[in-house]
Amino acid sequence: MKIRVHVRIIPRTGLLDPEGQAIAHALSALGFAGVGDVRVGKAIEMTVEATSPDAAEASVRTMCERLLANPVTEDFSIKVERA
Amino acid sequence: MKIRVHVRIIPRTGLLDPEGQAIAHALSALGFAGVGDVRVGKAIEMTVEATSPDAAEASVRTMCERLLANPVTEDFSIKVERA
């Protein structure tokens, strides 16, 4: 079955995130008050051919560990669309 | 109250996504078969000061429309952490 999987890769807490800081400043300049701790990472969506949603999640977890995320600087989370 | 909000910004379906294609090729080269339609966008997390989760979501929606997303080329979705 074809399964749509969503991955979110975000810089680890405590690491500098200049892009997040730039967005926080830009939002403040546009008049949005009370915005803080902005972190910017990658959102990846893909369709995976797998026997079950759990198998798809396990496969995408391996992809994150081997290619998509940097385990030293980034955290990732995976969400599987269950039809 | 301080509310954590997650935003996902993804290139619209039908638009060319070279970064997604590059990831699809790299995954294939690493031996992951059956991966298709990879799309890469931005994941943004922020803490918003708002009176309610719904108010936080409305505020972040305006931020997406005015700054964070390009409405011509990108779709966005917003998820509010409800404590």
Image: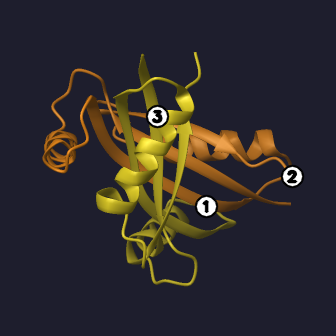
Chain colours: A orange, B yellow
Q: Amino acid at mark 2?
A: Ala
Q: Earlier in the sequence, mark 2 or mark 1?
A: 1
Q: Which residue is mark 2?
A: A83
Tag 3 and tag 1 share a subunit:
no
Q: Is residue B14 visible?
A: yes
**Which of A13/A23 is in front?**
A23
Q: Residue drawn at (52%, 74%), measured in percent from left and top?
A: B12
Q: Amino acid at mark 1?
A: Met
**Which of B76/B32 is in front?**
B76
Q: Which residue is mark 3?
A: B56
Secondary structure at numbered mark 3? helix
Above or below: residue A49 compared with residue A70: below
- Left or right side of B68 for B26: right
**Which of A24/A43 is in front?**
A24
Q: Which residue is mark 1?
A: A46
Secondary structure at numbered mark 2? loop
Q: Residue drawn at (46%, 23%), measured in percent from left and top?
A: B51
